[in-house]
Amino acid sequence: MSRDEAEGRVPSDLHPQIEALYSHRNADQAEALQSIAARGEQAAPAIPVLLSMLGWDDGTNAQVVAVLQRIGRPAIRPLVSELICGSEYTTDTAEVVLARQGRGGVGRGSTPTDRAMRLIVECDPRWNARRLTVVSLAIGGFGDPAIDVLFTARRDVLEREKRGLIKSEHASRAQGWIAWTLQHCTDRRFGTWAEWEAWHAKRTTSSKPPAK
């Protein structure tokens, strides 16, 4: 995302922070991220810009994820959408990526230009998988509030596959990333979607208030 496009998506009072994020100076970026985080949900217009920053290097990833979690619930759906869309462009799973990089090494590297970023996504599916790993871990940090969104996303993926809007390969990878993300949210491990759906149905029923 270019700087002009980013500034076009946020209120004018956030432009100084967006300018600082694109400065590539660590101190300026850190200060801008702190300022955005302090706004909480009011910083929701900055979510697309923050998403575009994920996957570059560990220091920035950790700070951006922290800001997204400070923004709260408005960040969950965009993150899940990022997970689903990005899964089309990767052949790697999160487990493979973590095995290559180590849990502390997701997305190492200096920040490339926007043009280079597009080339990397198009030509190196392993890089995109590392980025999706960061997105998945970010969603997992929300815990319970993200669970229903993830199950809804999976149903949407299945419906789009049924209607021929996405390929079966994409639907399969998307479901894999959703399941892996649910593990982060719930600390549970199920081997099949039937088990996940049964657990979710039981959870949904038990959370409903008793009928009067």
Image: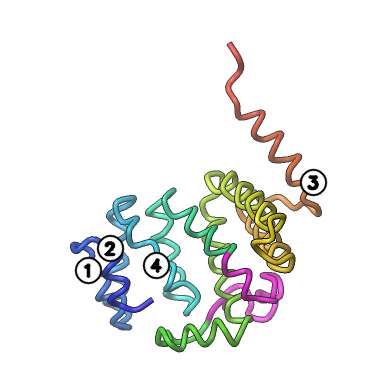
Circle 4 residue: 50
State the image coordinates of residue 55 (x, y, percent, origin top left).
50, 75
Q: Magenta span covers which residues?
A: 85-107
* Pointers 3 and 1 in contact (C-beta within 8 Å): no
Which circle, 4 or 2, is nearer the viewer?
A: 2
Which is more toward the observer, 39 or 154?
Answer: 154
Secondary-structure class at tag 4: helix
Task: Tell me if residue 91 is in the magenta stretch.
Answer: yes
Which is more toward the observer, 212 or 153?
Answer: 153
Neighbour class for label 4 at 10 Å: few (<14), some, many (≥20)?
many
N-terminal-most mark, 3 or 1 = 1
Secondary-structure class at tag 2: loop
Circle 2 residue: 10
N-terminal-most mark, 4 or 3 = 4
The residue type indicated by label 1 comes to His
* Pointers 4 and 2 in contact (C-beta within 8 Å): no
* Pointers 3 and 2 in contact (C-beta within 8 Å): no
The residue type indicated by label 4 comes to Leu
Circle 1 residue: 15
Neighbour class for label 3 at 10 Å: few (<14), some, many (≥20)?
few
The residue type indicated by label 3 comes to Ala
> What is the distance, in whole Å, between disc 3 and disc 1 at their CAs?
47 Å
Q: Quadrant of the N terminus?
A: bottom left
> What is the distance, in whole Å, between disc 4 and disc 2 at their CAs?
11 Å
The residue type indicated by label 2 comes to Val
The answer to whether residue 128 is left or right of residue 173 is: left
* Pointers 1 and 4 in contact (C-beta within 8 Å): no
N-terminal-most mark, 1 or 4 = 1
